[in-house]
Image: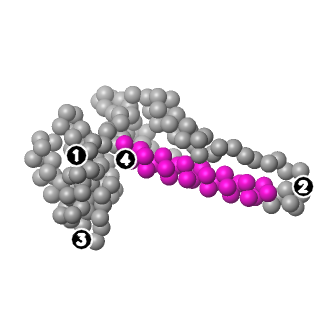
């Protein structure tokens, strides 16, 4: 088991911090989770159908996997698992506009070859949240990082300083 997530949660408890989860990321994670559950269900159903054809009398499986997966995801990211450690960061209309401008201007996390609209929306949600609380961006996404070091891209650092983050 990877100890980094456990260490992060312990640290957040010690400093009375929280995990900010932008709505756009939560929506993406939920859609991936639902699709994975549906794929696994379909695979299991196909295998049981094959076994039924070969052996007979296998149970027929059915159910609303998408609804169950949505519910399970909400439970996992709700009070049951993370409780008050998880804070939803809303995506506001101005975040969409600012993100579009970043992509058009090819500013990080976008580049000449990579149009990172969702990451740009995420960046603006983080900037807004950072104006009222200390934020730490934990990422391996190279669009946010400096080419020469593992620091935040200089243009993003400058943008953060301009808004007081």
- Taking depth in this image into account, of 1 and 58 the one nearest to the observer is 58
Residue located beneath label 4 in the image: 24
Q: Secondary structure at mark 3?
A: loop
Residue located beneath label 3 in the image: 112
Q: Secondary structure at mark 4?
A: helix
Residue 51: within the magenta? no
Estimate the x, y position of residue 80 in percent, counting from the top left.
Answer: 50, 29
1 or 3: mark nearer the eye: 1
Q: Any mark on residue 52, and which?
A: none
Q: Is residue 9 above or below residue 49?
A: above
Query: Around disc 4, counting alpha carbons within 10 Å, would you say few (fewer than 14), some (14 to 19), or many (20 or more)?
Result: some
Estimate the x, y position of residue 24 in percent, counting from the top left.
Answer: 37, 47
Q: Is residue 160 above or below residue 39?
A: above
Tell me if I can see residue 1 in this picture.
yes
Residue located beneath label 2 in the image: 56
Q: Secondary structure at mark 1?
A: helix
């Amino acid at each position: 088991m990877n100890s980094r997530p456990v260490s992060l949660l312990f640290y957040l408890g010690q400093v009375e911090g929280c995990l900010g989860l932008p709505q756009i990321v939560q929506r993406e994670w939920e859609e991936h989770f639902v699709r994975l559950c549906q794929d696994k269900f379909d695979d299991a159903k196909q295998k049981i159908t094959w076994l039924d054809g070969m052996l007979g009398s296998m149970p027929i499986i059915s159910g609303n996997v998408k609804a169950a997966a949505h519910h399970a995801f909400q439970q996992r990211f709700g009070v049951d698992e993370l409780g008050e450690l998880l804070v939803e960061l809303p995506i506001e209309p101005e975040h969409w506009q600012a993100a579009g401008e970043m992509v058009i201007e090819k500013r990080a996390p976008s580049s000449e070859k990579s149009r990172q609209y969702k990451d740009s929306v995420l960046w603006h949600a983080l900037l807004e949240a950072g104006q009222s609380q200390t934020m730490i961006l934990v990422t391996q996404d190279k669009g946010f990082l400096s080419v020469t070091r593992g620091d935040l891209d200089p243009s993003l650092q400058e943008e953060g300083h301009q808004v007081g983050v």
